[in-house]
Image: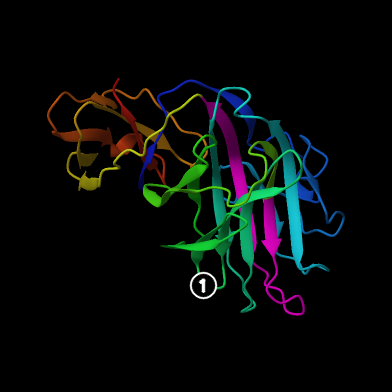
Amino acid sequence: MVMAMTVSILSGVTIYSTDFSNFPLGDDQLVGFESWDSDANGVALHGIDNNLIPGGGKSGFLGLNPPDEDYISVWRPLDYAPLDQNKAIVRFSAVVAIIDSTNSNWDNFFISFHNQNGDALASINFDNTNSYIFLDDTEHVTNTEFLFVQDTFYQIELVIDFIKNEWSGFLDDEIVFDKIRFHGGDKALDLGNLSVDWLITNLEEPGDNWMSFDNINITAESGPYSVLKVPFINVSVNSALKQIQLIWDSEPNHRYEVERSTDLLQWDSGAPDSVFITGDEPEQLIYSDSIGSQSSGEFYRLKVNLNE
């Protein structure tokens, strides 16, 4: 599998990062560790799972079992003021999946941002009733018209510009939305709680769907940021030479780096001939890897930077 993504060339500070490796396994084992909390404890609606991606280790989950309320949240305080710290660009990344219902009932799952006063700022909604991704800026709900696939693990990245009050979102190699208004109200623009939320469509017949989330990383940068063009990658396999090739058309004055992973969580860089820096003219680039060096289920991603 091949993915592509954009990353910042700017240095930043880490607000929060976790791979849940230090959490105990089981229902209700998310809350109480690393300052995670919830409004529904002790009823097996959230917790820590293991090896949903083979070899991927622990991950958080929300959903699955029938709830008593129609809106369930887990959250983690961030308590960071991007504007006060002169680091107005905040990046959220994680590995997420919506695991589909088996009972023909479907719900909504959100990643939400709140300020330090507890006010809602914005959410991204994975609507499992129709598979569309929506944005909610607290004043308007926008359909991005992006369809996600259930039971599929995505690398999500959300980039928030607190000066311009706008954000962009990516799933793997695709732009879901670009520079859309972040918060539609007049609330203070800083970071309080990050939450993962479950909105039950019909409390009498809740879905047994659930959301998996892992490898959360939140950083702040001084900015500015730009959305880079993500290339289309052709994959060629030469069985005789036991070789796989990734082929793409580059942009001028860019830096490309191929990374490899077996679990979508830990990514290896520094392989021979995996970094490409282009000049003033576009060119076709080729990365080659030996099939014999792979384990089953090898993943590739292409990191794209401006070469400044």
Extreme front residue here?
Answer: 186
- Kind of residue indicated by mark 1: Asn
Question: 136 or 150, which lies in front?
Answer: 136
Question: 276 or 159, which lies in front?
Answer: 159
Q: Residue at x 55, y 25 (%)?
A: 87
Residue 58 percent location from the top left of the image: 65, 43
Q: Residue at x 41, y 45 (%)?
A: 296
Q: Is residue 52 left or right of residue 132?
A: right
Render colour scheme? rainbow
Q: Residue at x 76, y 34 (%)?
A: 34
- Image vertical order of residue 81 relative to residue 74, above or below: above
In the figure, residue 230 lies in which quadrant?
A: top left
Q: Is residue 268 left or right of residue 282?
A: right
User: Which quadrant, please, contains the C terminus?
Assistant: top left
- Main SS class of the magenta portion in the image: strand
- Image vertical order of residue 43 relative to residue 276, above or below: below
In the figure, residue 18 lies in which quadrant?
A: top right
Query: Quick one: SS at disc 1?
Result: loop
Disc 1 designates what residue?
130
- Taking the magenta stretch, the answer to whether it contains residue 43 is no
Residue 57 visible, this angle = yes
Residue 54 visible, this angle = no
Q: Residue at x 60, y 26 (%)?
A: 14
Residue 74 percent location from the top left of the image: 74, 50
- The stretch in magenta equals 196-221
Question: 196 or 213, which lies in front?
Answer: 196
Residue 156 percent location from the top left of the image: 50, 46
Q: Is residue 209 left or right of residue 70?
A: left
- Image vertical order of residue 177 relative to residue 305, above or below: below
In the figure, residue 305 lies in which quadrant?
A: top left
